[in-house]
Amino acid sequence: MIPPFRAQSTVATLPLCLLIGCTQESESPARDDVHSAKAVATRPADASQPLGADKTHPGPHFSIDDGACGITHRNLSGPTAEQGKRYLLDCIGPGIAVLDADGDGRLDLYFAQGRAADLPDGGDCANRLYLNLGGRRFAEHGADAGVADRGYGFGALAFDFDNDGDSDLLVTNHGPNVLYRNDGGRFTDVTAEHPGMAGGAEDWSTGAAAADVDGDGDLDLYVCNYLRHDASDLDRRGLCRFMTECHVPCGPLGLDAQADVFFRNGGPPDYRYTEASVDAGLAHAPSYGFQPVFSDVDGDGDLDLYVSNDSVPNFLFVNDGSGRFTEVGLVAGVACSNAGLAEAGMGVACGDLQGDGLPEFYVTNFSTQLNSLYVNRTRPGGPPWFDEQAKPVGVGGPTLFKLSWGCAIADFDNDGVPDIFCSNGHVYPQVDDCRPSEIVYRQPCNLFAGVAGPRLRFTDASADAGALTTVPDSHRSCVVADLDDDGRLDLVVNRLDESPLVAWNDTPASGHWLALQLQLPGATPEAPGHAAVGAHILARAGDRRWSAEVHCGSSFLSTEDLRVHLGLGDTAMLDELLVHFANGAAMRMENVAVDRVLVLRSPSPVPAGGAAPAPDAATADADAAGKGPP
Amino acid sequence: MSARRILLAVAACLLVTAGTFAQQDKVFDQARSLRRSGQPGAAAALLAAAIERHGRDERLAGLRGLCLLDDRRVPEARVLAAPFAGYAGREPRVHVLLGRLAQADANAESAIASFRAALALEPAFVEAYACLIQVAMSTRQFELAAEEAGRLEAIQPELGRSLGADALVAQAQVIRSAADEQFGYAIEKYEAALVKRPGDRAIARALLDCMIDYFRIESARALSASIFSEDRDAAERHYYEGRCLDALADPPGALAEYRAALASDAGHVAARHQIARLAIEDGRFEEAREQLALAAAAGPVSARSCLLLGLAEEGLGHDVQSEAALRESVSLDPGNNKALYHLGRLLVRTGRGSEGEALLARVNTGPR
């Protein structure tokens, strides 16, 4: 049995709900043209060294795709760095969404796109959808699929808002946002059906995240807004001073921040969104929001909300279980530095680094502000409580001169210990003309390899991880996903004014792994299941434990793969696997084979109308354990 | 009266006047010597008697005013200076007196004008330079301070370099606290200060801390090796090597160096604080508390030691003791942001939300 290392996850009370009989299980669809997940997951013959117990094995390594994968478009963000960027608007860059757009089981990629300043109509500024053809090849399909929005794009959220089993898209823009409904691979702009979803013409929306915060069976939505970009006002101001001798685009401080917006999903039949910030307790002072992520930070079974804010304190909104929130970031210790100073929060990654069932947050910050690692110290039944520990655990110091954006907590070498990745590049091209010289515009990314042991610790593995982490560039947003289904997590990193980088994970001695595609019952017979956002996974092998959540919206302006990937090191079989779904259902399996994609569907359907799940053995016990919906 | 008598009378007057001047010179020199030997009160008394005898003399009055200020008798100095309001005469000491009074009144602009007037009259007037540099530093006019220190250096090399170093250190401290992006300038200023005062360990330590905080590890190691090169410096060498390893995310290595520092000098409080900090970060709160107790026995209580104790006690679940230590830290250093932050969080967590929130609002008043 897994010890109840989450107070409310007293899974010992659950009766066995063995997979066969009460759930559906399948492996990832067989594909002729790609490696079978199971086949390629076999550890290489020379990888006899047990992983996780030490760090003698080679660390993560990535090879940059040379363009053969077919993702070649150039990111547009106003004037290029060489042409001179005068506005912050042109220095941020857009996000990326990982999704299965056409329902073929392969992970596709959606890229938001900015605009070119010097080309008519913004240049070739349509957002891009690349369908995964397998074999590390993609084909551009955005215009055909109907998702080629031409706004000045920033955020890309892939989520199934109508529970029909396919992934819809929210594109956030400077200007009106766009919500696309996916119907079997064909997208329709349905923004007008959702009051307030587009936002104002002058709104600058950034990151977004979705989760079922009120337990009614559908995905609610939180959209960050950044600041009011007024070009004429900025032209009057000119450039602003930075460091001592530099002049750079102004902001965000000194410019008008915009408030984030929360939308509640009305559920079937229309799944219409209604702005509900005040009702949910999420109306707050405008705060230069960049990226939200939903996570159960205190282990009480509901989804709380973390928001990284630029230059002002970050937010942590705690859910009371009914979908009403209270902001506690400062007291909880996740709002600012360990010295009580607000920092320039950019991206945020969320994951359990300690194996205690509670999530940590890794937040990327400005140059000379170390990135932050908020380590979860919440006591059972207590309020959220974190300590900022980036420097002592080894993920702070190397970011001192970096300005980081996208980030991820993931086990890239499958050694059973999560790693941390952050993409770096200074916001201001002009910084190259500034002193001191350590702070430069183009910067290599960082990869921190988790070190096994009783103490949370990382080593900077950047030097050995390939060009992505050694070659300076204008990196911005990033996503993690096993795009080639080989059991190793790949990276896609956007670059400002350049084409995205696809970094294939070719770590030689990768350990065992398990990917979990978790589903809730679909709304219609035609839609057998949809992504189980917010599901919480606990896994055990001997005395080793892992936990993870399904996040929809994280990193920076992006959506990562909704499949949960566990690196398992030398663990060839899990003794126990527990899944708590957001609808209150729970599932337990024993002796779980690894090195495969496991599809698990919640055993209890969510009835139409959003009532509590129909009782069955699993949900009844989950409720008794305090993991059920309110 | 015959012409001869007139000439004799004039000669007599001249002799008397010369004698008076000679006496005044003598008094002036005596007073100056007394002042320089740290007896400004005696100097002021001597000058007062001379002024009483000989009437108003700007030079004696100016020097007496400066002596009164040295003797912290500011009201008397003000009375003495009152008749000189708007002074445009040629006695530099009166200008310096007026400048120092303006400086006391926080009127830096007027003070600087007075000191400059003094220097225009007496370009080698060291005191005027020193005062000018001081007021420039206090008002963060570091370029002015460095410029004047350079001029003083031409007259009195040692003093000029020393004051120049002070100006550079003050500038470096301001740069460090104001904007992290300018850390390179802070390092440059510390380095320049160390050139002016080679071997100054206070400056070297500040420079080492700055280098290590900003990851210039190899430079820090080289500096540490050159500054702390003697056998008696072993503790400092180990301490700064520990700091370097700390920055390089090698806590075990750092701990070993801090322990080596203590082996060389059991009273090295900073090393013990670092060991306590590492223990706190590693969750070994009891050990941290023990180290802090040893540090308290070896040196005075500081805001930092109280902060660390507060964090250790909090880690042990001793909220009352933690609160007391954090409050002590704040009382020792009201601007201690970190102590305010942790105290605020502790108070909110233990049910004193309003006070805690007020503290948190204080610490988090703005971005970096």
Image (spheres, grey):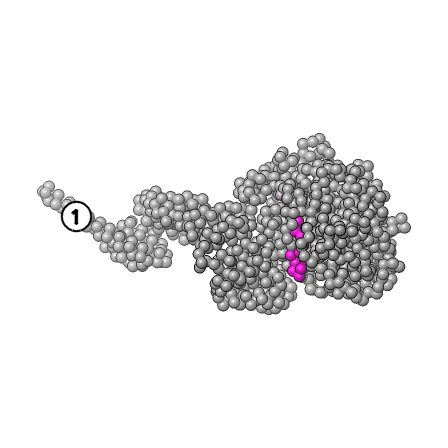
Which residue is found at the position 64% from the left and 65% from the top?
B351
Residue A233: x %, y % from top left:
62, 39
The amino acid sitting under disc 1 is: Leu
Quarter of the picture containing the N terminus of chain B is top left
Does A385 appear above or below A497?
Answer: below
**Subunit under mark 1:** B
Residue B89 visible to the viewer: no
Which residue is found at the position 74% from the left and 58% from the top?
A546
Task: Tell which of B271 and B359 is nearer to you.
Answer: B271
The part of the chain drawn in magenta is A444-457
User: Count the marks: how many?
Assistant: 1
Q: Main secondary structure of the magenta part?
A: loop
Residue A327: x %, y % from top left:
68, 57
Q: Is residue A175 magenta?
A: no
Which residue is found at the position 61% from the left and 60% from the top?
B281
Corner quadrant of residue A112? top right
Does A233 appear above or below A577?
Answer: above
Does A432 appear above or below A382?
Answer: above
Instruction: Report whether A390 appears left or right of B306.
Output: right
Task: Give the secondary structure at mark 1.
Answer: helix
Residue A203: x %, y % from top left:
70, 43
Q: Is residue A447 magenta?
A: yes
In the rendered image, the residue lying farthest to the top is: A120
Circle 1 is placed at which residue position? B15
Residue A58: x %, y % from top left:
68, 50
Task: Tell which of B110 and A266 is nearer to you.
Answer: A266
Instruction: Report whether B57 appears left or right of A130.
Output: left
